[in-house]
Image (tube, grey):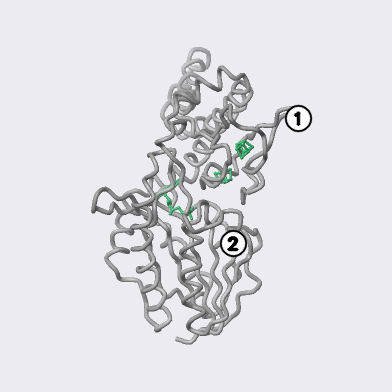
Amino acid sequence: MAYRNTTIYFMSGTGNSYRVATWMGEIAEKNGSNTDVFSAKNKKPAKEIKNGNDNLIGIVFPAHGFTMPWHILKFVWRLPRRKSTHAFCVAARGSLKFGSVFIPGMSGSGTFIVALILKLKGYNVRGLMSVDMPSNWFSLHPIQRAKSHDAIIARAHHKVKSFIERIFLNGNVWFTLNNLYEITGGILLSLISIGYLFFGRFFLAKLFFANNNCNGCGVCTENCSFRAIKMWGKKNPKPFWKYSCESCMRCSALCPQNAIEAGQSWGVILYFITAIPVSFYIFSALNVTIPGMANLKGSWIRTVLDILYYYPAIFIPYYMFHFLIRIPVINWIFAHTTMTHYYFWGRYREPNTKLTHIDEKKK
Ligand SMILES: Cc1cc2nc3c(=O)[nH]c(=O)nc-3n(C[C@H](O)[C@H](O)[C@H](O)COP(=O)(O)O)c2cc1C
Ligand code: SF4
Ligand code: SF4
């Protein structure tokens, strides 16, 4: 199909989704389409999307929590309604390689939810795909060596090329084994995805801290698409991670001092604080004084109370933690009880992508 215009929107923390988007942009241009590749960071997206089936848009994003990142959900939700404009969506998963074995990631419900929203907005969704790129999730596992990354990226390039070429040949890319794998995983893991979107991502954001090597340069805060880092302290500014953090890992990959840790020992403490069954204690206490309240045990009110407790329970201790780790010896203890501190653990960024350019409008 000859598309007059192709517009690809991407969200990318460490460059994988950006790379996928630019590969697609190159093929679209080769097919004679006016092509733009934009960062999806802007809150008001897409005046440039035109009606009609000679226009194609693509949404490319990393898999987070077996679904799409919250920011992409908001972005797609705010896209304008269109009549018969063609669309596709692609998730960059996190893959590992052991010897000659490639371990696939899983984007779960991500591409399907994005495709559904696009469909409801009047777009003609031509296809969806998830593609394995190197995993950047350094709070979970050590980052692999460059050789493994190169092999994973080479395979991904091939896959992305054939996907977009099929779209340009007027094909549909819906019924693939890969999509079957994803929808099955997406359904089975849907509770984890909901938990990730409403709770987990805030918890992950509050694991970040800067170790004693941080010199307050501000590179992390300048390059965060979501303005999720605030430099606190006049004399000795240190980064403080806000709730708006999407855990995209860019700041940690970019820090010139390699100072950003995903505090695992701190995470254990934070987990125990958030897991305190506050509603149980409140109702036990109320039971003593208010007869009949026992019936409320196990009710939805308890669930609501526990949820209400969760958000301040991560924010307030993190706030205190942020001040405590200004004391070098405390910072040293938390850094040295975190695996991400050790050299072998590593940080990931897509080897051919300049992270400072990820957010710029690209042709
Ligand atoms: C917080 C977080 C959650 C992630 N969740 C998943 C996941 O559920 N499935 C998966 O395959 N990869 C997951 N990953 C790995 C990334 O999606 C993957 O490395 C992706 O290619 C990164 O793309 P980017 O460089 O464009 O941000 C996760 C990474 C992070 C940081
Ligand atoms: S980029 Fe690194 S050194 Fe610079 S302020 Fe951020 S954490 Fe500190
Ligand atoms: S603070 Fe760091 S991890 Fe969070 S969204 Fe910004 S760059 Fe990404």
For disc 1, the marked residue is 234
Examine the rendering and report whether any part of residue 100 can be seen. Answer: yes
Dot 1: element: loop
Q: Is mark 1 within 8 Å of ligand 2?
A: no
**Residue 355 x, y percent position in the rendering:** 56, 54
Identity of the amino acid at label 1?
A: Lys
Residue under the point 29% across and 63% down: 180
Of the pair 159 and 212, the residue shown nearer to us: 212
Which residue is at the far top?
288
Q: Is residue 3 above or below residue 141?
A: below
**Residue 84 x, y percent position in the rendering:** 51, 80
For label 2, the crowd category at 10 Å Cα-Cα, with few meaning under 14, some 14 to 19 and many 20 or more, is many
For label 1, the crowd category at 10 Å Cα-Cα, with few meaning under 14, some 14 to 19 and many 20 or more, is few
Left or right relative to 285: residue 103: left
Which of disc 1 and disc 2 is earlier in sequence?
2
Identity of the amino acid at label 2?
A: Ser
Residue under the point 53% across and 41% down: 252
In which quadrant will I find the N terminus?
A: bottom left
Examine the rendering and report whether any part of residue 296 can be seen. Answer: no
The quadrant where residue 363 appears: bottom right
For disc 2, the marked residue is 39
Of the pair 232 and 183, the residue shown nearer to us: 232
